[in-house]
Image (spheres, grey):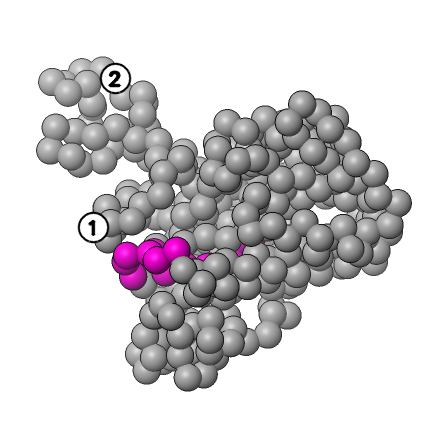
Amino acid sequence: MGIMLPASPDTYRQYTSVMTHKKQYHEGMFQFTTGDIDGVHIVLSSPPPIGSFSLTAIDTYLLERIFRPGIMIDPGTAGSHLSQLSMGDVVIGARVVNFSNYMTKENGAIVPGQFSALVADDEGYTIGNPNPEYIYADPVLVKLAERAASECPDTPGKILSAPMGRKPWIMTYGTQGSGAAWLRNVQQIRQSTRIFHEADEAGNYPIALISTLNKVPFVEIHTISDAAMNVPTKMNAYFHQCSVFAQLRSNKIALQMIHYLAGEPYRYIPFSGGFRDPWQADTFVKAAVPPAFVQVWTKKYGVKRG
C-alpha cells in the first residue's frame, strides 16, 4: 500500500512509530519509507515543498513505479467550500477535480478546461464546452474509507469554536477539489463551486491522475481544517491546531483501513474508477446536502473560527 502525506503538518511519525522492518530510500530529492503495519507492507512519502503540483506528481509516479503498491491512499486536510461543512468533517474524495484548470471569458466568467475549446467564436470558446474532467476513486476503497471514518469520535468544541462538539459529517461521495491555487474570496469560491462542484479544496489532483495512469486503485481522504467560506483565513495558533487535528484524523482513518485489510491478507482490489464514473447520476448532488444533525447543530452554533 502506498500512502502520500502532505509536507505540512508533519505527521510522518504517526505511521513510522507503528512500523516494523523500516527502511529508508532516496530518489533525488524524494524520500520513501517502507515497513509493515499490522503485517501490511507500506510505502510512505511526502512531496516537498508544500502545494507543488509538479513535485506531487513526480513523487507519486516514483512511488508507484519503483515500489509497485497495490493501492494508493492520500490522507490530508482541506478547506471547506460548503457553508455547513466544518472543521473535523471528513470528505472522502469519490471523485477529484482540478478546479484551477479553466479559461476565463472577457467578463471574467470561468469556462472549465484550459485548452478544451479553442475553436469557433470570437473568444475561442464554443457552446457545449465539456464538463470539468473528473477522476473517480476506486469504489471498494471509498466504502472501506467510509467504514473507517464512521469510527471517528465527535469533533471537540474547541476545534469547532463552539461550546460543544458534534459528530463529524462523513461525506462518503465527496467531490475533492484540487488546484494549484488557494481561493480566499467568497464570490470566487462560489463561482468555482457552481462550475466544478467541489466540496473542498486541497492540492492532490496529481495523485489521482498518476494513480489512474498507472492503474493503481486510489482514494483521497481529507478532513476539513479550515472553513474557506469564513474569510479571511488567519494563520494563527488556532489555524495550526485545526490543521494538526485534521491531519491526525485523516491518518487514523488510513491506519484503520490498514487494520481492516490486514484481516484479509489475500484480498485483491482490481483497478476501477479513474476516468470512468462508477456512480449513479445523482450521487454527488445528494452527498453535498448536509445531514439533519449537521443542519440542526449549525443553526444553533454556526461555523466559526477561534
Q: Quadrant of the C terminus?
A: bottom left
- Mark on residue 118? 2
Using residue 220 as the reference point, say whether residue 36 is left or right of it.
Answer: right
| Mark 1 lies on residue | 187
In the image, what residue occupies the spot 60% across and 70% down? Answer: 152
Mark 2 surroundings within 10 Å by alpha-carbon count, few (fewer than 14), some (14 through 19), many (20 or more): few
Reading the chain from its start, which is encountered first: label 2 or label 1?
2
**Label 1 SS:** helix
**Label 2 SS:** loop
Please provide percent x and percent y for residue 250.
Answer: 59, 57
In the image, what residue occupies the spot 12% across and 28% down? Answer: 106
The answer to which of 220 and 202 lies nearer the viewer is: 202
The answer to which of 223 and 95 lies nearer the viewer is: 223
In the image, what residue occupies the spot 33% across and 56% down? Answer: 233
Using residue 234 as the reference point, say whether residue 2 is left or right of it.
Answer: right
Residue range in magenta is: 221-235
C-alpha separation, residue under disc 2 versus residue under disc 1: 27 Å
In the image, what residue occupies the spot 77% across and 59% down? Answer: 259
| Three-letter amino acid code of the residue under disc 2 | Leu
Please provide percent x and percent y for residue 101.
Answer: 35, 31
